[in-house]
Amino acid sequence: MELVIAITLGVLTSTGVYLILRARTFSVVLGLTLLSHGVNLFLFSMGRLTTASPAVIGLVEDYTDPLPQALVLTAIVISFSMTAFVVVLALKAAVELRSDHVDGEDPNEDRQ
Amino acid sequence: MDIGLLVFLPVVGATASLLSRLKQPGPDHVQNHALVALIAPAICLLLLLSYLPRIQSGEALVYSLSWVPGIGLDLAFRLDGLSWLFATLITGIGCLIIVYARYYFAGKDTAGRFFVLIQLFMTAMLGIVLSENLLFMLVFWELTSLVSFLLIGFTCSSRDARRGARMSLVITGGGGLALLGGILLLGQIVGSYQISDVLAATDTIVSDDRYPLTLSLILLGAFTKSAQAPFHLWLPHAMAAPTPVSAYLHSATMVKAGLFLMARLHPAMGDTELWFSLITITGMITLMVGAFVAMFMHDIKGLLAYSTISHLGLITLLIGMGSEMAMAAALFHLTTHALFKAPLFMMAGIVDQATGSRDMRNINGLWRTMPALMLITVIPAAAMAGLPLMSGYLSKKMLFSESLLVTAPHWANTLIPVWVTIAGLFSVAYSVRIFHNVFFNGKPVDLPHWPPRKKPVGMLVPLFILAAASLLVGLAPQATYNSLIHLAVMATSMTQLPLYDFSALSNARVPAMMSMIAMIGGIVFYLARGPLFAIHRQLPEVDAKNIFEQIMQQCIRFAQSLVYRLENGSLQRYLAFILVAAIAPALWLLGGYSGWQGPSELTEVNPIVVFGAVILCLSAIGVALFHHQRLPALLLLSVTGLFVTLAFAQFSAPDLALTQLSVEVMAVVIMMLALSFLPQTSPRESGAWRVVRDLTLAGLAGMGIALFAYAVLTRPAETISGYFLANSVSGGGGTNVVNVILVDFRGFDTLGEITVLGIAAVAVFAFTRDLHLKERVASAGTAKGFAEPHPVILQMVSRMALPIALLVSAYIFLRGHNMPGGGFIAGLVTAVALTLQYMAGGLLWAQERMLTHFRPLIGAGLLIATITGLGSWLVGYPFLTSAFSHMHWPLIGEFELATALLFDLGVYTTVVGATLLILANLGKLMTVAGPGQEVG
């Protein structure tokens, strides 16, 4: 089971990293989203993964670790707001620079 | 009185000068400025004189105030014989320079600036000689480099001045860096930066392995500052400075800082073979190079500059010899040199201003027009030449007799006496030349001002005082030595010494003969100057400044190309660098690690989880594979998000699942909106190499994360959450521990998070506010055929769903403290419900019916949360923390529950406000006509 989780985290990270290295802003946004999924799941898994034991007192016998969950909850909201910000930044850049290349200019006009 | 006062008085004086300059700008008030500028140095001088009796009794006054004890930096000053001698020279000559500058700068509005800078410089110099702490001294050391940069480049409109200033800054500043290294090493060896401790640790220092390196670095700093070959090049080029600057910095004070440092550290680091050979050889080369070049200089200041270099070399040579008598000769000559070189520079300045030239091929026969100047100049020129009865005669004779005493190493015992005699010969020649050429030698040739302009008599006063002092030292050397210099010599050897015997010196035969040879040879040399100059002209000309500039340009070009290679404007490349920097050390450190498999037993594989993981991975890979087709990639991304949500749900995190679900909806909507303005496809432009590079980086990163995760997951968990679980109900008043952590235990964090959320939303608002996409939307709209932008069925359903959704969100909000839910989730659910209305009905439709002031909403939310936190102060508890810790007080239990809800209400309001602000503003861009009013 642990192996499955680890591989999933690895795949999320790899795809995220690959995409943030792309040249177009939209790909970078996609990559950031994947990467934040990966990071959130990684943090979450640090509290170990248990099934059917939510940290609600009195509901179950054993409780899962609530601390990573609290951290990840705010992380989800923050990464959402950052995604929104980056999306608008990309829009603004695309309009003002007439290119959605991350460097703000098309590679043909790029310096060597 | 504190010794520290000595150092900081000139700063006060500089400030006063600055104020006086601001109050009376313009060229007409130089006299007032000079008077103001004279106050602080004069007080310093008087203070120093008042210390003399205590110094003469052999006391070393130390004043110390702990400043940054962590790095051994103290505000500490030390006044002993050596620092007293230097400090007195600095302040005394400084006062005379200010008097001289009063006339030199008469009628120029730059005078005020000079008086400010010269006092700052005085502070820096006094700081060097009076510091007890080596690090502290280094600060002043660098300060002299900086102020000297400003003073050399004083005439900043002149290219020569700027280049000269830059050259001196690079050389002395570079030396300062070396010195920093040396002092840090020295501090490590000794364990303290206090000079007292360093001086007491001679054996430790000399026997340490790092001694050669430490000494070399420190000497590099001293040599660059004191213009020792081959670092002497900056000094002649510093002559672009106004003459008072040259007279002060480049003859009397700053260039002596390196000598001071060597003399100061001599007891701690001297008397080794390395000390002897490094310093003596450098001194010998400098002595000869300076004396030789000086003879062929036609510029008066140039001649004086090279002569200064030569004399600095001479003193260095004596310090290198290191015996007590050599030190006595070094310090004696240092004093006499300051006394004769400063007036010679002043003379050069007067001649320059009077005739408009400094070229000795043109300036001749000034004795007719400037007899007083000539009479005064006789003394320093004779002293420089080392004529009998003059101070320079004695110091040179001391040098000659010391040179005879050098026995080891074998190469030195004949070479040094011959060498110094030849150098002495040159110095006689150039001294005769400067005097004879300027005041006699026929008639002047093509001078810009002829007859020369009259200079005020007052300008001669400082020359006269210095020349008189020089004469006095020459006439009464024993008294001068006994009262002033002997103590300094003892401070450089840290032992009790017998007094230097000048009567024995005057009886010594061989030194007298060496002096005679030098004198006669020098005069012969001068008489034969015609053919010699002709030969010298044949020699290839080397302009150090051009070479230096070329080297500088090459350095700059190299740096540029390096920067260009690293920093070419490509963000992809920067990102790749960052990733490499993160991955490479991990690879290096963990490359051979094999303990990834932890001791815990693996849990059973759950087929449903595997199925979910496979879909998650496939969709993520799909995003990466098909990212060129943006819409499909976005759809696949939402699948990934959905399965992340399911993962949270599966692994006992209902709060996270709810949050992720609502966030996912919002995020995809936002990206959809953005996609309607962006190209629908990404071009395939990455070359094969780049794809391989990125795949490698991505693969390594993913592998690293997977390995880390696996390593952690296979090890037993240790958590601090036991506390939260145990205290959630009793301390936080809620059974949903995640929510209690958010609003109570870690409430301050949450406050920070919602603030970030609010800021991000406001930033989005600011960005979209003046973004004009209307043309794009119009074309995109027709091309994609938005015939029916707002389907009726969707409108109807969404309207009906709205009250239910709001009810659900209210329920989630209220139960959040005890069951999965809470402000974050409720806020997101509300935002999703309202967003649906926007999408179904259109922006205008929605705005007519809804609240549109989202920014106040964010502010209100933050305010509610903060005030709730502050409320706990009212009942005597820390901000936000544990408003519930007094839950066990039975009477106010209800009240506490209310504050938790209140804080969560703040979270809820902020989330709703921020999310809708982002969405509405992005949506606004879609509207072709644009909504009539601003959204937000």
Image: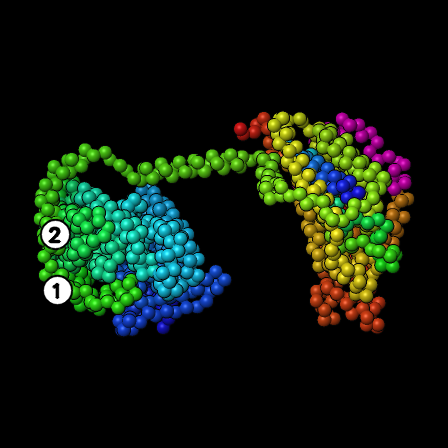
Q: Mark 2 points at which residue?
A: B514
Q: Position of residue B549 (x, y in %)?
A: 35, 38
Q: Mark 1 points at which residue?
A: B503
Magenta segment: B769-798
Q: Position of residue B479 (x, y in %)?
A: 17, 68
> Is residue B642 shown left or right of residue B95?
right
> Is residue B886 shown left or right of residue B70?
right
Task: Looking at the picture, tell me which residue is in the foreground, B467 or B473.
Answer: B473
Q: Where is residue B816 in the image (x, y as percent from the top left)?
A: 83, 56
Whether residue B782 is in magenta: the answer is yes
Whether residue B731 can be seen here: yes
Residue at x 90% of width, y 36% of height = B793
- Cα distance in 3D space between marks 2 and 1: 18 Å
Looking at the image, residue B879 lies above or below residue B696: below
Whether residue B869 is in magenta: the answer is no
Crowding at label 1, few (<14), some or many (≥20) Cα neighbours within 10 Å? few
Q: Do labels 2 and 1 share a chain?
A: yes
